[in-house]
Image (cartoon, rainbow, N blue to C red):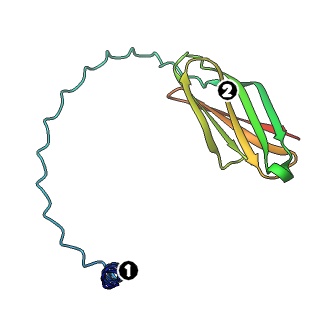
Amino acid sequence: MNNNLGTIAIILAIVALLLSGVAVAFNREAGPEGEKGAVGLTGSQGPKGDTGAQGPPGQNGNSASVNLLPTIKLVYMDGNYIGIMPRIYNYCKYTYGITVQVDDPEDETIRVSFYYSDGSAGPWNAVSVFYGKDGKYSASQDFQYTAPQGIKKIFWLVEAWDGSDIATEVFPQTISP
């Protein structure tokens, strides 16, 4: 009996120590912030690079060629509505897709960017960006809802930049369930 009382007393003492440690941890406050250390020296500036080669002088009386805007033509739009018992599974999905043909008259490398918005004036949300030459470019955007939205319309903004000029076109797209 004496041995059991001693074991119980040791267990109670350990539990009391643990609880006092937890109580101290809850009442902690952060100390004051220390002083900021010294800032190191600024390094020396490197030498200035050589001037690049100068191009040949232009001919008098000849104008430089004019860079023409890229053109953007709609190839097709596709869309899809999937409604899977929205009241039970809380799921319906609208998928919008667009394909355009981009042509730069000078055949320069172009950046083609796709954006979408709920209104024809924006704000525009970025979807994808492509870099390349003349050709077809496509993008798609999914929207998932917990209830059917009925007829849903978005606007696509397609931007083609050839490094000098930017062409933009806006295309509306409607999906009805």
Q: Residue at x 39, y 14 (%)?
A: 59
In the picture, the disc for residue 38 is none
Number of labels in the image equals 2
- Check the image and name the residue furthest to the front: 1
Asked whether residue 148 is in view, the answer is: no
Q: Mark 1: which amino acid?
A: Phe
Is residue 177 shown left or right of residue 25?
right
Is residue 165 shown left or right of residue 18?
right
Q: Residue at x 78, y 52 (%)?
A: 146
Q: Quadrant of the N terminus?
A: bottom left
In the picture, the disc for residue 26 is 1
65 or 73: which is nearer to us? Answer: 73
Front of the two marks 2 and 1: 1
What residue is disc 2 on?
Answer: 138
Q: Position of residue 173 (x, y in %)?
A: 80, 37
Q: Mark 2: which amino acid?
A: Ser
Q: Position of residue 6 (x, y in %)?
A: 30, 83
Is residue 114 shown left or right of residue 110?
right
13 or 86: which is nearer to us? Answer: 13
145 or 99: which is nearer to us? Answer: 145
Mark 2 → mark 1, Cα distance in angstroms: 58 Å
Q: Residue at x 30, y 77 (%)?
A: 30
Q: Quadrant of residue 151?
A: top right
